[in-house]
Amino acid sequence: MGQDYSYSQPSSSDEFDMTYLLEAEAALYADEGQSSFSVGEPVRNPPEADDGIPTRCYCGSEAAIATSYTRKDPGRLYYTCENRDDGGCHIWKWWDVAVTEEVFEVQRELRLLKEQGFECDQKLLKLQKTVCELKKNKESTNGYALEVCVMVSVLVFLGLALMFVNVDLESPEPYWFGTQGPDESVLESPLNSAVDTSAKEGRKWSPREEKILIGAWLNTSKDALVSNDQKAGRFWKRIVDYCNNCPQLVGTTPRELNQCKQRWEQHLES
């Protein structure tokens, strides 16, 4: 024990500068923070898949095929690296295992392609069905519009046909082929029936008779059955029958066939 320990208070010159320590500590932390960003990452080779046939080793060299001479696997091929003796980490894989895995991978990709093709076919069928439905809707809309147009056209044509209907030889003549209006009387004076046969040949044609003759000729010439037989007696016989049976000429002397033909020839010459 006999030692004498004496303690003395440090002088002001020996005191630590706290500001300096704080600045130094802050600089140290800043250097540590920056060092984590500035440290370069080690060079890494592209990752090589563990499945399938390897093409490149972990060290970056190309994979090579070697032959095994062990008792367990004599003559068996395997993938390795030319730098396998440098003590580093290199690839090593049996050749048949790699080929089998590669075949399975190709089959898997082929199956995925078939599934994608099936999905594409289903989408295509759905799209075709949609297009067909749209086309049917459009055709139905256009068909409805076409039906409306056809119906309107038919109604218009029927109206025109009723206005300009052909005169039927078996029916009374419409008033627009006669000399009188629809409100005029159609009876002729009974005195005309007393005309004898001698005066019948020289009897003049009244405007009413001429209009009836013209109307009969026009309507008879439109008949397809007699249009090619106008010069025959059948054609003029129908005209004469129509003129003589017309209600507007009731009570008048009937006209002969020659009279009608001569009067029509006079119209053509004039």
Image (cartoon, rainbow, N blue to C red):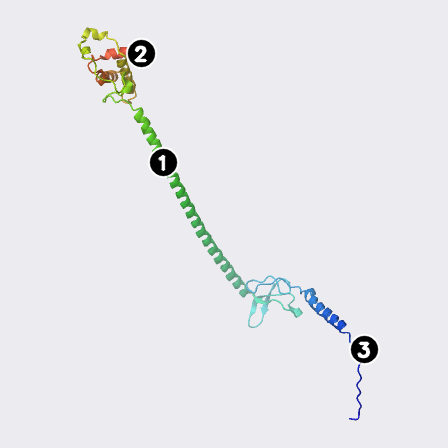
**Residue 132 quadrant:** top left
| Rendered position, 12 above or below 50 | below
Which residue is identified by label 1? Answer: 148
Which residue is identified by label 2? Answer: 267
For the residues labelled 1 and 2, the Cα–Cα distance comes to: 47 Å
Horizontal side of residue 121 vs 48, given as left or right: left
**Residue 82 quadrant:** bottom right
* Residue type indicated by callout 2: His
Number of disc labels: 3
Residue in the picture at 46% in, 54% down: 119
Depth order, front residue of 130/170 = 170
| Rendered position, 159 above or below 265 | below
Q: Tell me the number on the disc at residue 12.
A: 3
Horizontal side of residue 20 vs 189, given as left or right: right
For the residues labelled 3 and 1, the Cα–Cα distance comes to: 116 Å
Depth order, front residue of 51/126 = 126
| Rendered position, 147 above or below 162 | below
Q: Secondary structure at mark 2?
A: helix
* Residue type indicated by callout 3: Ser
Residue in the picture at 67% in, 69% down: 86
Q: Secondary structure at mark 3?
A: helix
Ranked by sequence position, the earlier of labels 3 and 1 is 3
